[in-house]
Image (spheres, rainbow, N blue to C red):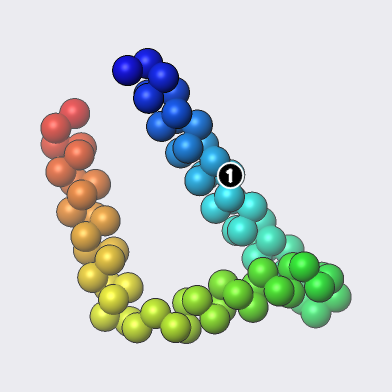
């Protein structure tokens, strides 16, 4: 059971680091603009394609679902 908990913590740490690296790449693009480099532009383009491909009602539904799960988990703590 301890190994499973350690694996879960490691997985969440990896997800958080990946998300922070994407946010940092977008911040670099916002600061430097078109001179930010090929990698930064490609990451930003992929994020923009993903964001524009998801319909607005789906984003609203997903955010409401995440908020409900967050409130339920906080209530049980």
Q: Residue at image x 74%, y 68%?
A: 40
On the question of residue 37 being in view, the answer is: yes
31 vs 47, nearest the viewer: 47
How far across and down, in percent of the image, does residue 20 sit?
59, 50
Q: Which quarter of the image is occupied by the N terminus? A: top left
How far across and down, in percent of the image, does residue 75 sit?
14, 36
13 vs 6, nearest the viewer: 6
On the question of residue 31 being in view, the answer is: no
Above or below residue 46? Residue 52 is below
| Left or right for 38, reference 21 | right
Q: Residue at image x 46%, y 38%?
A: 12
Q: Residue at image x 81%, y 73%?
A: 38
| Left or right for 21, reference 15 | right
Q: Residue at image x 23%, y 70%?
A: 61
Q: Label 1: state its secondary structure.
A: helix
Question: Residue 7's image quarter?
Answer: top left
| Left or right for 62, reference 14 | left
How far across and down, in percent of the image, does residue 73 sit?
20, 39
Above or below residue 22? Residue 12 is above
Q: Which quarter of the image is occupied by the C terminus? A: top left
Across the whole image, how many numbered discs are drawn on residues? Answer: 1
Q: Residues within 10 Å of mark 1 (few under 14, many from 20)?
A: few
How far across and down, in percent of the image, does residue 70 sit?
24, 47
Q: Which residue is mark 1?
A: 17
């Amino acid at each position: 059971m301890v190994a499973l908990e350690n694996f879960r913590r490691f997985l969440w740490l990896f997800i958080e680091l990946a998300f922070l690296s994407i946010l940092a790449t977008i911040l670099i693009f916002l600061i430097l603009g078109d001179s930010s480099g090929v990698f930064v532009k490609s990451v930003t383009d992929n994020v923009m394609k993903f964001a524009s491909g998801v319909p607005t009602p789906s984003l609203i539904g997903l955010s409401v679902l995440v908020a409900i799960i967050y409130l339920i988990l906080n209530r049980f703590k």
